[in-house]
Amino acid sequence: MKVICIKHPTWRGSDQKLYLEKVNTALQMNPDVLIGPDYSLCSFEGVDKIDFNSIESSMADLAKLSQEHSSTLILPGTAVVSREKGFAGLCSFAFLGGKEIGRFFKQSDRGERKLLRANGLEYSPGRREDNHFVYDGKRIDVEICSDSSYPKISSETFMEVIQAQEFVPSPLNYRPKDIPRTHFYPRSGLNDSHRHYVFISDGGLGVSVQGILFDPKSKINRGCTDLEGVKFDRKGLKGSMTQYDIGNSNEK
């Protein structure tokens, strides 16, 4: 299974043209799964006025790209989406075969309430435990930025996707000095209880993209680049994306 994570600056708004170019470039490599960061589908007018027209346009473009690359599961990132009247939430999307197959709303609040009130809306949070789906017979959990701090994912989870704007591992977690922060899964040994993959796509302020095979039997969880049998390839990605081949998807 080939997974590509995109790194794209999203602080104070995302350059939609550039981001969609990155998505298109990544899709040319025929990944099984493509993952983008938090707020990747949000543009702003000024400091905090959300450009909802831009969001709708990007969603339409993503549906077209998904149709052209119908075998790739696209988790492009997040955008603000209206819910009930006067309320909105931060939503992650899933596309497959040209269709939107899932929406996952963020539960925690790390500035979303303030942002939405600046746009005349109230924040409507989702439920972290609802943010999962099955792809190719395997459970994928979607965590939007700070939702990754909620304890314990399901023992059935094969892949944990963290879409972040500034993903910074907790200083409370065990990490030997010789292990780079970017190769360490922040909840190691604390909450999760089974072996599974973790992929992080970051919006430019945190630890960048990374892929990790989490193993509760080990306090140290190196990035996928260090694992035997896990192929790592940056060829042609120019630093804005990282490609992982996690081989036999039944490894866990």
Image: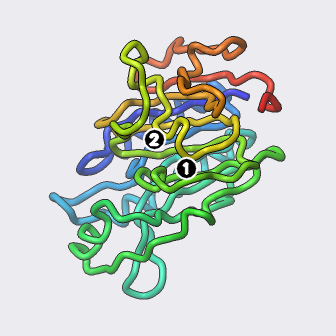
Q: Quadrant of residue 222?
A: top right
Residue 49: image location, x then y, percent: 22, 65
Q: Horizontally, is 178 left or right of 217 in the view?
A: left
Q: Would you place residue 139 above or below residue 7 in this image?
A: below
Tag 2, which secondary structure? helix
> Residue drawn 52% across and 51% down?
61
Q: Residues within 10 Å of mark 1 (few under 14, many from 20)?
A: many
Q: Would you place residue 219 above or below residue 137 in this image?
A: above
Q: Horizontally, is 238 left or right of 14 in the view?
A: right
Q: Is 228 in front, or is 235?
A: 228
Residue 211: image location, x then y, percent: 55, 28
Q: Which residue is denoted by mark 2 in the rendering?
A: 20
Q: Between disc 2 and disc 1, whose residue precedes?
A: 2
Which quadrant would the C terminus be assigned to in this image? top right
Disc 1 marks a residue whose amino acid type is Leu
Q: CA distance from mark 2 to mark 1?
A: 8 Å
Q: Quadrant of residue 33?
A: top right
Q: Quadrant of residue 118?
A: bottom left
Which quadrant would the N terminus be assigned to in this image? top right
Disc 2 marks a residue whose amino acid type is Leu
Total marks shown come to 2
Q: Would you place residue 190 above or below residue 122 in this image?
A: above
Tag 1, which secondary structure? helix
Q: Is residue 18 visible?
A: no
Q: Which mark is residue 62?
A: 1
Q: Is 98 in front, or is 242?
A: 242
Q: Which mark is residue 223?
A: none
> Residue drawn 42% across and 59% down?
79
> Residue drawn 45% across and 55% down?
78
Residue 65: image location, x then y, percent: 60, 44
Residue 166: image location, x then y, percent: 33, 42
Callouts 2 and 1 close, C-beta under 8 Å:
yes
